[in-house]
């Protein structure tokens, strides 16, 4: 069960009218936010930084390799945005004084182990392996100097115009010779193979002789060490990322003390992408659910006090406080995406899906607050739609349709009467459908979908909206919020089916449990109550919403998530947008690329 702090609110009577009592709590929260959040607080809280620089570390020479040669071990500190990309490494061997002896240029797909969710690291270290023949190894030991150049341009969308560039080079110097430089081993480049295929790669070289074993087996497929190499076989049906961990025990560390031996072992993580060949082109457009609203471009989740400065304002929009954006305040006149469009911070469902399959040709042009009509022909954002259409993407990802609709229905004074009226006379769904018609939802979606189908050959994944229950949806019960979302998702699926059932693939996110009875919108077959009350499951909603629901439904509420983990909804916006964990759940529903 959840380990959240205990709730100390007052008791409120259960039932729909009791949920209206949320007004007092919501107004108190809003007043506190507006009082404390002075102008600029959100921007100051965002420790936004430009990408780190490439830096080369101390170069070492490995112990003798299998056939008597050796390897130069070149540790390079890369910006996290370079993870998963093919990077060059230039090496020159020279006599002391400058006479050239040999040179190499390596191209390796470097990686930062598996990205975290969200990813807040600014940099990672990758140790390159430059193989030397026995003759060159002896010459290096005899005093040859090494000059290295690492890094280069980051061209995320592969349009020939780099979004970022960084490199470093060393002066000619003699490498550090083993022993005496610890247990440095080369990193294993990221591997990509087809499903059902196998690959054989050399075991890492280290500054001391190491005996390797497979310590953590891959989640999918089989791995073994054979004739000094790692052999991996992918299963026929699997698509995606799998990983394993090699551990090497340096010579001289025996089995006298198992604990000491394990502590002395050197880990070497291996990441393998199983699926299509590299070169898949992915583009994303849409609103805040595609942009990863609730997180800065650094991968940091912004706090509740930043809400006044982060709530989308526009048009024109600046995409503030979104995972694909450099901007940290809605008052900024600037507009700038982060260099890799939020791919490396691994927040949005689009980024997590691309990272799962090793896709690097990626753009997320989504803008928080935007509406379907603005992306359609004639809209203020259509130039971005036309831009991705001209880039011939294989896949277009989007979530679009909630704006301005849900903000008006949930928070607009004119539409709050829907909830009050329906309590007396019924007809809640008809009221919401009239709101849809008022903003011409179907017509605007149809125009955008048609434009994409006619001007690309892409497979278009339309992610529907997950159920999130804001703690400030003061006029509505949780069941009514769930019904609104269900009706909206139904409209998205209906229009997609009319435009192109083949090209427009509707993706339904998993149900985000509320922790109370929200039937008939979603079945309530789960109970964690001693009194037997049935709910939809352990709640994955935001902490403010869970705290509130626990007060409003003291005998039936089921806290969560279970198993323990972060909520699937962020707290900073009072419980409206998915968290990085919630986006993981959404990304898991998107089919693998062909």
Image (tube, rainbow, N blue to C red):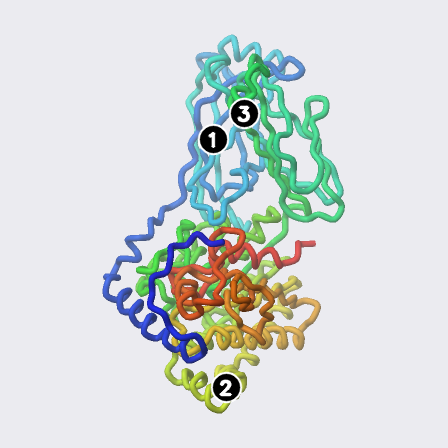
* Residue nearest the viewer, comparing 452 with 492: 492
Of labels 1 and 2, the one closer to you = 2
Of labels 3 and 1, the one closer to you = 3
Give x and y (percent) for residue 463: 58, 65
Give x and y (percent) for residue 162: 48, 47
Q: Residue furthest top?
A: 142
Where 310 sits versus 408, above or below?
Answer: above
Query: Which class describes the residues within 10 Å of circle 1: few (<14), some (14-19), or many (20+)?
Result: many
Q: Secondary structure at mark 2?
A: helix
Question: Is 195 left or right of 268, judged from the image as shown?
Answer: right
Q: Secondary structure at mark 3?
A: strand
Residue hosting label 1: 76
Say which mark, if any, is on residue 266: 3
Q: Secondary structure at mark 1?
A: strand
How many circles with numbers are drawn on the protein?
Answer: 3
Say which mark, if any, is on residue 206: none
Give x and y (percent) for residue 71: 57, 20
Residue 544 appearing in the image:
yes
Mark 1 or mark 2: which comes first in sequence?
1
Residue hosting label 2: 431
Give x and y (percent) for residue 336: 40, 57
* Residue nearest the viewer, comparing 21 with 528: 528
3D distance between C-alphas at marks 3 and 2: 63 Å
3D distance between C-alphas at marks 1 and 2: 60 Å
Q: Are marks 3 and 2 in contact (CB under 8 Å)?
A: no
* Residue nearest the viewer, comparing 418 with 543: 543
Query: Which class describes the residues within 10 Å of circle 2: few (<14), some (14-19), or many (20+)?
Result: some
3D distance between C-alphas at marks 3 and 1: 18 Å
Query: Which class describes the residues within 10 Å of circle 3: few (<14), some (14-19), or many (20+)?
Result: some
Q: Quadrant of residue 350?
A: bottom right
């Amino acid at each position: 069960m959840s380990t959240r702090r205990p709730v100390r609110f007052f008791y409120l009577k259960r039932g729909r009218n009791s949920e209206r009592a949320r007004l007092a709590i919501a107004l108190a929260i809003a007043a506190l936010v507006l009082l404390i959040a002075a102008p600029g607080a959100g921007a100051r809280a965002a420790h936004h930084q430009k990408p780190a620089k490439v830096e080369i570390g101390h170069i070492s020479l490995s112990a003798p390799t299998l056939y008597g040669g050796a390897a130069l071990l070149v540790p390079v500190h890369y910006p996290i945005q370079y993870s998963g990309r093919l990077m060059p490494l230039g090496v020159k061997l020279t006599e002391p004084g400058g006479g050239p002896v040999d040179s190499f240029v390596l191209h390796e797909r470097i990686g930062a182990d598996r990205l975290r969710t969200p990813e807040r690291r600014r940099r990672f270290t990758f140790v390159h392996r430059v193989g030397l023949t026995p003759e060159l190894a002896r010459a290096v030991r005899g005093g040859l100097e090494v000059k290295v150049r690492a890094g280069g341009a980051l061209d995320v969308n592969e349009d020939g115009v780099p979004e970022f560039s960084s490199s470093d080079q060393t002066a000619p110097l003699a490498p550090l010779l083993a022993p005496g430089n610890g247990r440095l081993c080369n990193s294993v480049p990221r591997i990509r193979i087809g499903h059902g295929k196998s690959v054989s790669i050399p075991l890492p070289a280290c500054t001391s002789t190491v005996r390797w074993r497979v310590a953590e087996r891959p989640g999918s497929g089989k791995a073994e060490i054979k004739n000094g190499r790692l052999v991996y076989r992918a299963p026929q049906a699997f698509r995606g990322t799998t990983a394993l961990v090699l551990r090497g025990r340096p010579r001289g560390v025996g089995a006298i003390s198992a604990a000491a031996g394990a502590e002395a072992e050197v880990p070497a993580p291996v990441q393998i992408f199983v699926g299509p060949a590299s070169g898949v082109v992915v583009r994303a457009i849409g609103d805040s659910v595609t942009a990863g609203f609730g997180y800065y471009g650094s991968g940091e989740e912004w706090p509740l006090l930043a809400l006044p400065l982060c709530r989308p304002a526009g048009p024109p929009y600046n995409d503030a406080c979104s995972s694909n954006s450099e901007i940290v305040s809605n008052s900024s006149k600037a507009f700038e995406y982060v260099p890799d469009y939020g791919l490396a911070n691994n927040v949005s469902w689009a980024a997590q899906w691309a990272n799962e399959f090793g896709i690097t040709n990626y753009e997320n042009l989504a803008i928080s607050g935007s509406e379907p009509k603005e992306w359609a022909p004639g809209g203020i954002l259509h130039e971005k739609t036309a831009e991705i259409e001209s880039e011939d993407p294989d896949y277009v990802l989007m979530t679009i349709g909630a704006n301005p609709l849900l903000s008006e229905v949930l928070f607009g004074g004119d539409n709050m009467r829907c909830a009050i009226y329906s309590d007396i006379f019924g007809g809640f769904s008809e009221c919401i459908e009239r709101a849809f018609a008022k903003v011409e939802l179907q017509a605007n979606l149809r125009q955008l979908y048609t434009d994409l189908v006619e001007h690309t050959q892409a497979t278009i994944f339309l992610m529907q909206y997950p159920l999130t229950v804001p703690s400030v949806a003061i006029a509505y019960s949780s069941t009514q919020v769930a019904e609104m979302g269900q009706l909206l998702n139904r409209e998205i699926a209906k229009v997609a089916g009319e435009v192109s059932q083949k090209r427009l693939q509707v993706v339904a996110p998993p149900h985000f449990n509320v922790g109370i009875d929200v039937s008939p919108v979603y079945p309530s077959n789960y109970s964690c109550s001693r009194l037997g009350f049935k709910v939809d499951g352990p709640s994955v909603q935001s902490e403010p919403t869970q705290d509130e629901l626990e007060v409003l439904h003291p005998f039936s509420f089921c806290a969560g998530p279970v198993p323990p983990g972060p909520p699937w909804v962020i707290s900073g916006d009072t419980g409206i947008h998915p968290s990085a964990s919630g986006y993981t759940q959404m990304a898991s529903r998107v089919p693998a690329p062909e």
